[in-house]
């Protein structure tokens, strides 16, 4: 296990007059996966941007503790839903892209080989992106992110551009992969199945302005988790009840509001 501890202390974020997040406190633990789950517009991407230093908070602070390992080329590494692979480069070439200007050729080749093995892409090293399925391409996106040996991996709905079937097929494998990577991970999703399959700490955010509604723990390792596991299914139901109540409340408020 490796990676940084990211502590979020009473963060508030405003875009002009709109308050996106209010007084959010939480901590992503070294080498573990934190999932941020909540309805669309509740401030998940904003929170991730604040945690990774892409945005500066209106109030509060983000603290980063721990050692960044020597072989880490980029401590905070993002994976977004819309990943861009260069169509004229092979899978290996796309992964090498982030490394080749920064390390000698043999070291780069070795690191690409290792990360393709880790992500189950070894047999596709020489394939061009157009020959890959959406799920495989997203795996290349993860491989590219892991290649820099991030101290913290930040993923913003990385599977939501995939069709439901591809996503379901990929999900358990994806959990195992992120577990193997063993770095501090913050994973944003609105999908409850993803939340229970990937989360060791699941932070439920309320609708806007996003506040921490509840934090659930599922401490066991990601490897071997399955959508058929009873404890995961139970946690998913609990999450659904929380989020459903929140949505119903929002509906009632809208109905009560003067026209
Ligand atoms: N750059 C921005 N300028 C103004 N409002 C924004 C900006 N980015 C996000 N918002 C608003 O802040 C709220 C939270 O957005 P976001 O963090 O993207 O939520 P989520 O990722 O949970 O869907 C939304 O109401 C959104 O419209
Ligand atoms: Mg978002």
Image (cartoon, rainbow, N blue to C red):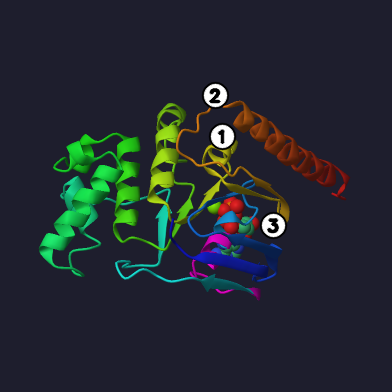
Q: Earlier in the sequence, mark 1 or mark 3?
A: 1
Vertical relation: 160 (above or below) 34: above
Check disc 3 and report the residue beneath it.
Answer: 210
Q: What distance separates the C-alpha of mark 2 from that of mark 3? A: 31 Å
In the image, what residue occupies the spot 49% across and 47% down?
157
The answer to whether mark 3 is within 8 Å of ligand 1 is yes
For marks 2 and 3 on the same chain, the one whose residue lies earlier in the sequence: 3
Q: Position of residue 28 (x, y in %)?
A: 56, 59
- Give me the C-alpha separation between circle 1 and circle 3: 21 Å
| Quarter that holds the N terminus | bottom left
Crowd rating for badge 3 (residues with CA inside 10 Å; few <14, some 14–19, many 20+): many
Q: Which residues are magenta?
A: 47-60
The reply, left or right, for residue 87 in relation to residue 252 is: left
Where in the figure is residue 145, as x and y percent of width and height?
Answer: 34, 55
Is 49 magenta? The answer is yes
Q: Nearer the viewer, residue 250 or 213?
A: 213
Is there any visible trace of residue 161 in the rendered image?
A: no
Please tell me which residue is depicted at 18% across the width and 68% down the height of the picture.
Answer: 103
Q: Where does label 2 land, which residue?
A: 228
Question: Which mark is nearer the camera, 2 or 1?
Answer: 2
Q: Residue furthest left?
A: 106
Q: To which residue does mark 1 refer?
A: 193
Please tell me how many numbered marks the rendered image carries: 3
Between 191 and 105, the residue placed more toward the observer is 105
- Of helix, strand and loop, which one carries label 2? loop
Q: Earlier in the sequence, mark 2 or mark 1?
A: 1
x, y (%) of residue 138? 35, 43
Q: Secondary structure at mark 1?
A: helix
Q: Give the distance between the C-alpha atoms of the residues marked 2 and 1, in whole angstroms.
A: 11 Å
Q: Nearer the viewer, residue 97 or 65?
A: 65
Please provide percent x and percent y for residue 174: 41, 39
């Amino acid at each position: 296990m490796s990676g940084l501890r990211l502590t979020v202390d009473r963060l508030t974020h405003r875009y002009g007059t709109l308050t996106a997040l209010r007084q959010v406190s939480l901590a992503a633990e070294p080498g573990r996966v934190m999932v941020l789950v909540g309805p669309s517009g509740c401030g998940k991407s904003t929170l991730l941007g604040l945690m990774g230093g892409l945005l500066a908070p209106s109030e509060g602070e983000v603290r980063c503790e721990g050692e960044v390992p020597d072989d880490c080329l980029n401590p905070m590494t993002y994976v977004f839903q819309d990943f861009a692979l260069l169509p004229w480069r092979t899978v290996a070439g796309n992964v090498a892209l982030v490394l080749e200007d920064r390390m000698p050729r043999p070291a780069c080749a070795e690191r690409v080989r290792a990360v393709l093995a880790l992500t189950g892409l070894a047999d596709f090293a020489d394939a061009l992106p157009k020959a890959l399925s959406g799920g495989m391409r997203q795996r290349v996106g993860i491989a590219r992110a892991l290649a820099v040996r991030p101290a913290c991996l930040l993923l913003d709905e990385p599977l939501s551009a995939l069709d439901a079937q591809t996503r379901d097929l990929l999900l358990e494998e994806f959990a195992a992969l992120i577990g193997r990577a063993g770095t501090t991970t913050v994973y944003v999703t609105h999908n409850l199945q993803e939340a229970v399959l990937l989360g060791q700490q699941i932070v439920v955010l309320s609708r806007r302005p996003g506040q921490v509604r509840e934090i659930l723990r599922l401490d066991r390792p990601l490897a071997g988790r399955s959508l058929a596991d009873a404890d995961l299914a139970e946690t998913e139901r609990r999450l659904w009840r929380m989020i459903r109540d929140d949505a119903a409340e929002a509906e009632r408020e809208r109905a009560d509001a003067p026209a």
